[in-house]
Image (spheres, helix red, strand yellow):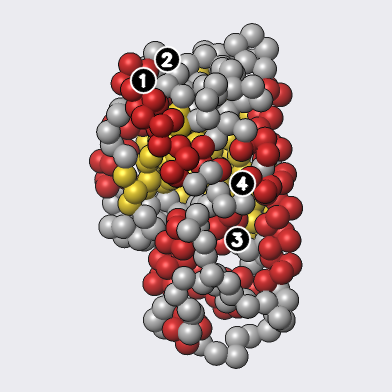
Amino acid sequence: MGPMSQSISTLVASQQSGFSLQRAFYNDPGVFEREIERLFLKAWLYVGHVSQIPGVGDYFLFEIAGESLIIVHSKDGIAAMLNVCRHRGSRVCVEPAGHERMLVCPYHGWSYQLDGSLRGASHTGNDFDRKQYGLKRVATQIFQGLIFINFDSDPIPFDSVEEDLAEPMRPYRLDRAKVAHRANYPISANWKLTVENYSECHHCRTAHPEYSKGHSLAYPEKHSKDLKEKMLERTESAGLLRDGIFRRGPGAHGVGIDRVYWRSPLLEGYQTGSRDGKPLAPLLGDLTGFDGGAADIQIGPVTFFLAYCDHVVVYRFTPREIDRTDCEITWLVNADAAEGVDYQLDDLTWLWHVTTLADKKIIQDNQAGVNSRFYEPGPYSTMEEMTQDFTAWYLELMKGE
């Protein structure tokens, strides 16, 4: 797409309330660059789970919109640093994950300690101060085994997320979980279309028959009232909090510290997200039973957790380019659960694999449609309340030069 014919502020002001976003929001480079600057370089972003880097020297890369971070287990704990050599800017780590005693740039051999400090640089002269040329660090936060980073030099405090989510998430003990599987589903679409799709289940009965067999969110809320009451009767005895349901939507208390926790019932006969509703893995953490429900959790602008009683599915949407988004899914189970004994990987991943393949198609078709010269925004339905909340917050974020 070429440059915008109007300012972004004018575009925001012309957006009709209660309607989907205009075409330029999904395909204009200037809009995308403002999103990166105002949201993704300031928000707390989920990058992975501590079980991915259990030993000193283990690392993995996190990449977003042209930036690359090294997430490494150093002697002092987990650190995140820009994957940009301080010599002439080469990538230091080129493999997506691995184990290193030190980080060595493959271009000219500059070497760094695992904390990012410069260890060696040849032919630099007597007055060269190594202390000034360590890899640039970014803020990190470990929350119940989940690793978050923030690019901002003065990041907004993570405290409000911990205050709201610590108690309702504690029974799952994700700090004692492990990654059973990770899969990436590249989607040829703008990141907002992926988040908008995840935020509503208006499409579920049409696009996701596998999901709709067991999840009440595929139906209007009035149809699940009795199921919810039955779930709540079992919630405390299963070891979960009956209360603590809340939604601090996008922008609450600052950019990029969105947090949501609520539980919804599964349909009759379903204990978890499986083909037949039967358990897939051992109960998580401190849980003592199944209450016939699942928790939807959001932390930050693009990371969503679906917590069943026996496993957690983590969805992360990462913008790579204006029309390319990585949808990475992580399946978490108890750390001591053994694959092939306590859970079967194909069964564990089946539901959200088939669901995401279907989502990928409808989102890409959505992008193709909004790219049309003849596309016009349409009105949201009553089952798209969260999507409407998201776009309203997004417009507030984007207005003003």
Q: CA distance from mark 2 to mark 1?
A: 9 Å
State the separation of the CA atoms marked 4 and 3.
Answer: 15 Å
**x and y percent of residue 351 in the render?**
65, 32
Q: Where's the C terminus, which quadrant?
A: bottom left
The dot on residue 305 is: none
Which one is earlier in the sequence, the residue at label 4 or at label 3?
A: 3
Mark 2 packing: few (<14 Cα in 10 Å), some, or many (20+)? some
Residue at the far top in the pictured view: 341
- Say which amino acid is labelled 3: Leu
Residue type highlighted by circle 2: Gly
- Dot 4 or dot 1, earlier in sequence: 4
- Give the crowd class for mark 3: few <14, some 14-19, many >=20 residues within 10 Å: many
Residue on which the image places disc 4: 204
Residue 332 seen from this side: no
Q: Quadrant of residue 330?
A: top right
Q: Nearer the viewer, residue 89 or 246?
A: 246
Instruction: Decide which of tag 2 and tag 4 comes sooner along the chain.
Output: 4
- Dot in front, 3 or 1: 1
Residue 56 horizontal/vertical position (percent): 50, 28
Q: Is residue 322 left or right of residue 38?
A: right
* Residue bearing the label numbered 1: 234
Q: Which picture quadrant has residue 58?
A: top right
Mark 4: amino acid: Cys
Q: CA distance from mark 2 to mark 3?
A: 36 Å
Q: Which residue is mark 2?
A: 289
Whole-angstrom CA distance, mark 3 to mark 1, is 36 Å
- Mark 1 or mark 3, which is nearer the start of the sequence? 3
Rendered image: mark on residue 193: 3
Within-10-Å neighbours for mark 4: few <14, some 14–19, many 20+? many
